[in-house]
C-alpha cells in the first residue's frame, strides 16, 4: 500500500523494512496551512488541495524553536521554519480495511523545542507490533503559546495562546478524516508523549475541544508543568514582549509583529526571559493557559472534578527522575501524578501507574540511573541506534553514564519487547494487562499499586510512598 488518497489529494511514501518485515513511511504530510504571515498566532487553517500525486518522502522542517540544550550542535544542523504543520505516518497495513489501532506521538522538548522527525521516534518497533503510528509537528514556544490582549480581542472566543494545542487538535481531526486510508481505525486512537509531550497528552485529556478525537492516553515523564496559568497573566507577558520588540507603539501592532522574522521574535523573547529572572531562562513564561475555552478550569481541576475526557490512561515516571543524580530531577512528579489519578473516573477510564527502572547494562555498571527520556529507546525499539544514544547523552552523563554508547544485554531487549507489547495492547484494548505477561491493576488509593518496568516486570505496592524519596540533586542542571 503506497499510493494513498487523502481528503486533500493523493500521496506516496517509502517502503522500509526491518528484520524482513515491511512498513510504509509517509513523511511530511501537511495537516494544516502554514501558520505564517497573517496566520501567525491564529488557529490552524485548512490545507489547500493539490492535484496529481504528492511525494511524501522527505521530512518537513522542524518548527521554529529555541536551541535544544541537550544537543545544541545537532539542533543547529536541523532547518527550522514557521511552516511546520506536518506529520509522519508509519503503517504496517497492507490494505485500507485492516482497522489497526492508531498511536499518535507528541514529542518532548518542554514545549520549546523538539520535533516528530527524529529517527528515534520514527523507528519501526511499534508499527511492527501491529499499530499505525503518527508523529506530529506543531508550533512551539512563543510561536505556539503567545497571548496578547489584541489577539484575544479579535478572537471569536476572546482568547489567545494555546495555538500549539489547537495544532494538535487539527492533527487529530486529520487522523479522524484520513487514517482509515492507511489501514488505521479512527475509532481507536491513543495519544502518547514524553516530558513536554506527556504534558501535551494531559492537556488534551483535559480540554473539551479534543473530546472524541482519541480514546486512550499515555503520559511519560510529563508531571512537572501541570499547573496552568490564567489568560490575563499570559497576556501581560505578551505585552512585555511587544514592548521589547518595539511594536507596541505602531499603529497596528499585530500587523507590525507579523512582518518580523521569527528569529527576531525568539531571540528577543530569550533576552526578555533573562531580564525577567532565572526562573524564566529555561522554560520562559509560555505555558498552557486555562482560558475558559480550551481549558474551562485549570488542568489539574479538570482531572480532579472528573471533567476530563474520560479515557483510560497510563502514567509513567522514570526512577532516576525521582532519585537522581541527573540533569532533570522531578521528585514532584509523583505528587503531580497523584493529583491526576485521584480524580473521579468511570470503570473504563481508570489510570494506571508505572515506574520505569531499566538502564542499559553497560551504563548500569558505570552507576547510571534510569534518567529522563531513557525509556524512549525501549518504547521505540532503538536499543541499537548509536546515534539516538549519543544525541541524548548530555542528559545521561549527569546521571552516571561514562561511556559514549552503552552495551545492550538480553535483559534490555526483554524490557523493550515487553513495553512495546504492553503499550500496543493498551492501544488495542484499553487494558494494559497482557495474558501470560502481566496483570496490571488500575491505580486505586486503597491498594496503591503500580507496575515496575524492569526485568522482570513487577507489580508493587506503595506508589504514594515514592513521595518520600530524597533525591540526589548534586549534579542537577537545567534540562
Image (spheres, grey):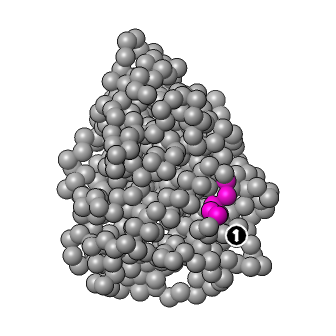
User: Residue 368 appears at what percent x and percent y?
Assistant: 34, 80
163 over 36 or under it: above or below: below
Quadrant where the image shows the N terminus: top left
Give the image quarter of residue 274: bottom left
237 over 2 or under it: above or below: below
Magenta run includes residue 118 = no
How many numbered markers are drawn?
1
Quadrant where the image shows the C terminus: bottom left
The answer to whether residue 462 is visible is: yes
**Residue visible at 59% across and 55% down in the picture:** 425
Viewer-proximal residue, 38 or 396? 396
The answer to whether residue 246 is visible is: no
**Residue visible at 40% across and 74% down in the picture:** 411
- Is label 1 in a helix, a strand or a loop? loop
Q: Is residue 282 left or right of residue 437?
A: left
Viewer-proximal residue, 316 or 36? 316
Viewer-proximal residue, 228 or 387? 387
Q: Is residue 218 left or right of residue 16?
A: right
337 over 71 or under it: above or below: below
**What is the crowding at mark 1: few (fewer than 14 residues within 10 Å), some, or many (at least 20)?**
some
**Residue visible at 54% across and 75% down in the picture:** 457
Q: Is residue 24 left or right of residue 298?
A: left
Q: Which residue is mark 1?
A: 441
User: Residue 245 appears at what percent x and percent y?
Assistant: 34, 43
**Residue visible at 63% across and 42% down in the picture:** 188
Give the image quarter of residue 40: top left
In the image, the segment drawn in magenta is: 430-435
In the displayed orientation, state which residue is furthest to the top.
Answer: 51
Q: Main secondary structure of the magenta part?
A: loop
Amino acid at each position: 500500500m503506497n499510493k494513498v488518497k487523502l481528503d486533500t489529494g493523493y500521496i506516496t511514501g517509502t517502503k522500509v523494512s526491518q528484520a524482513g518485515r515491511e512498513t510504509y513511511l509517509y513523511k511530511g504530510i501537511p495537516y494544516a496551512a502554514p501558520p505564517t504571515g497573517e496566520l501567525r498566532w491564529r488557529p490552524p487553517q485548512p490545507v489547500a488541495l493539490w492535484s496529481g500525486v504528492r511525494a511524501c518522502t522527505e521530512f518537513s522542517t522542524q518548527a521554529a524553536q529555541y536551541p535544544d540544550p541537550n544537543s545544541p550542535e545537532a539542533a543547529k544542523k536541523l532547518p527550522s521554519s514557521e511552516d511546520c504543520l506536518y506529520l509522519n505516518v508509519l503503517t504496517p497495513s497492507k490494505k485500507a480495511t485492516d482497522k489497526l489501532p492508531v498511536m499518535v506521538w507528541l514529542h518532548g522538548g518542554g514545549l520549546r523545542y523538539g520535533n516528530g522527525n527524529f529517527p528515534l521516534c520514527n523507528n519501526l518497533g511499534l508499527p511492527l507490533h501491529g499499530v499505525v503510528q503518527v508523529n506530529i509537528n506543531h508550533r512551539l514556544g512563543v510561536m505556539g503559546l503567545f497571548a496578547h490582549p489584541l489577539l484575544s480581542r479579535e478572537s471569536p472566543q476572546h482568547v489567545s495562546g494555546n495555538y500549539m494545542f489547537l495544532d494538535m487538535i487539527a492533527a487529530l481531526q486529520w487522523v479522524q478524516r484520513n487514517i482509515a486510508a492507511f489501514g488505521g481505525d479512527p475509532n481507536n486512537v491513543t495519544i502518547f508523549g514524553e516530558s513536554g509531550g506527556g504534558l501535551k497528552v494531559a492537556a488534551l485529556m483535559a480540554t473539551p475541544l479534543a473530546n472524541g478525537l482519541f480514546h486512550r492516553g499515555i503520559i511519560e515523564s510529563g508531571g512537572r508543568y501541570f499547573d496552568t496559568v490564567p489568560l490575563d497573566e499570559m497576556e501581560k507577558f505578551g505585552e512585555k514582549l511587544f514592548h521589547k520588540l518595539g511594536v507596541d507603539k505602531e499603529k497596528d501592532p499585530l500587523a507590525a509583529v507579523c512582518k518580523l522574522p521569527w528569529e527576531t521574535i525568539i531571540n528577543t523573547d530569550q533576552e526578555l526571559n533573562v531580564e525577567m529572572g532565572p526562573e524564566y531562562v529555561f522554560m520562559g513564561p509560555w505555558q498552557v493557559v486555562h482560558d475558559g475555552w480550551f481549558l474551562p478550569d485549570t488542568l489539574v481541576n479538570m482531572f480532579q472534578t472528573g471533567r476530563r475526557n474520560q479515557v483510560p490512561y497510563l502514567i509513567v515516571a522514570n526512577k532516576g527522575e525521582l532519585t537522581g543524580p541527573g540533569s532533570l530531577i522531578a521528585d514532584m512528579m509523583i505528587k503531580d501524578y497523584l493529583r491526576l489519578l485521584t480524580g473521579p473516573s468511570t470503570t473504563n477510564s481508570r489510570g494506571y501507574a508505572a515506574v520505569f527502572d531499566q538502564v542499559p547494562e553497560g551504563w548500569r555498571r558505570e552507576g547510571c540511573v534510569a534518567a529522563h527520556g531513557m525509556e524512549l529507546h525501549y518504547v521505540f525499539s532503538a536499543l541499537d541506534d548509536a546515534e539516538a544514544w549519543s544525541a541524548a547523552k548530555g542528559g545521561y552523563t549527569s546521571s552516571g553514564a561514562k561511556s559514549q554508547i552503552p552495551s545492550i544485554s538480553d535483559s534490555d531487549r526483554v524490557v523493550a519487547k515487553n513495553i512495546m507489547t504492553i503499550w500496543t495492547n493498551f492501544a488495542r484494548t484499553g487494558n494494559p494487562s497482557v495474558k501470560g505477561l502481566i496483570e496490571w491493576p488500575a491505580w486505586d488509593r486503597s491498594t496503591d499499586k503500580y507496575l515496575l518496568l524492569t526485568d522482570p516486570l513487577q507489580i508493587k505496592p506503595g506508589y504514594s510512598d515514592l513521595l518520600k524519596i530524597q533525591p540526589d540533586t548534586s549534579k542537577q542542571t537545567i534540562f
